[in-house]
Each structure stands twice: as C-alpha cells, then as structure tokens.
Image: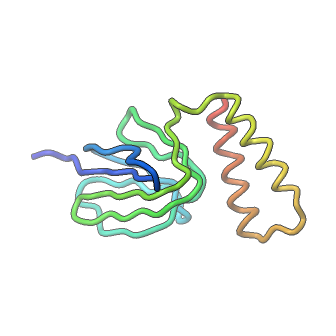
Amino acid sequence: MSEEFKIEIISPDKSVYSGQTNNAVLPCFEGQVTILKDHIPLITFLRPGLIEIGNNEKYYVEDGTVEFSENNLLILSSTVQSLQNIKTENINNMLKNAEKDLSDNQLTDKQKYILDYKIEVLKQINQ
C-alpha cells in the first residue's frame, strides 16, 4: 500500500506544484509541521519559511494557508517561490529590505515576529 498523498501548491496566478509525496514539512505559526499520509485534518496558516516536499522539492514562502483532509494537502500562497528559481541577488535584496523594515519602531510585535522568521530563513537559504 502506498504511503503517498496528494499535494498542491497554488498561487493566485498559477499552480506552482502538483504531485504525490510521502511527506511535507511546513513552516506554520505553531512550528514546523510534518504531514504524512493519514495525518489528522488540519487547517492552519504559514509563516515565513521553507516548504519541503519529499527529499527534493523546496519552496520559500512568506505567508499562506494550509488545508489537509482525506490525504489531500492544499497550500495557498501569493508569495511561494521554488528555491531553484530564486537568485542570490534577489535573496540579498529581500534580506536587506526585511532588515530595514525590522528597524521601524512603529511595528507591532506580530510584524516583528514575522520579519524575524523571514530574516532567519533568508540567511539560511543564502548560506
């Protein structure tokens, strides 16, 4: 019996990924969430981080929603990008902008929390 489940990543203008996988790791506000076949139903939100699909696919995401039900994982995000398609120059620019934004004294704690995660992930990708 197969241990795979269906996964789709969709942005407003296109389908980013569609396929089958044995596992997916998602950056959620509750922490890193690993989804395996027959996981309990789940609806949650994404924070900045990496979506890992199986052993090969990785996507950078800043926000979005996740729904897992009946072995179907649906990820909706307007900021999802394959790591293979992100250039180092773009990562450096996003990192500089996030660090600049973080220095704003008018930010809420939630905005600071999200920017901290974004900076941490961008530095990790840039290594």
Percent x, y of residue 117? 67, 53
Count of marks overlaid on the render: 0
Percent x, y of residue 23? 33, 47
Q: Residue furthest front?
A: 13
Looking at the picture, does residue 8 appear above or below residue 40?
above
Looking at the picture, does residue 124 appear above or below residue 35?
above
Viewed as shown, does residue 69 lie left or right of 124?
A: left
Residue drawn at 82 percent across, 67 percent down: 107
Residue drawn at 58 percent across, 33 percent down: 86
Residue drawn at 57 percent across, 49 percent down: 49
Percent x, y of residue 74? 35, 58
In this picture the colour scheme is rainbow
Front in this rendered view, residue 95 or 38: 95
Viewed as shown, does residue 21 lie left or right of 43?
A: left
Viewed as shown, does residue 103 lie left or right of 98?
A: right
Percent x, y of residue 46? 52, 60
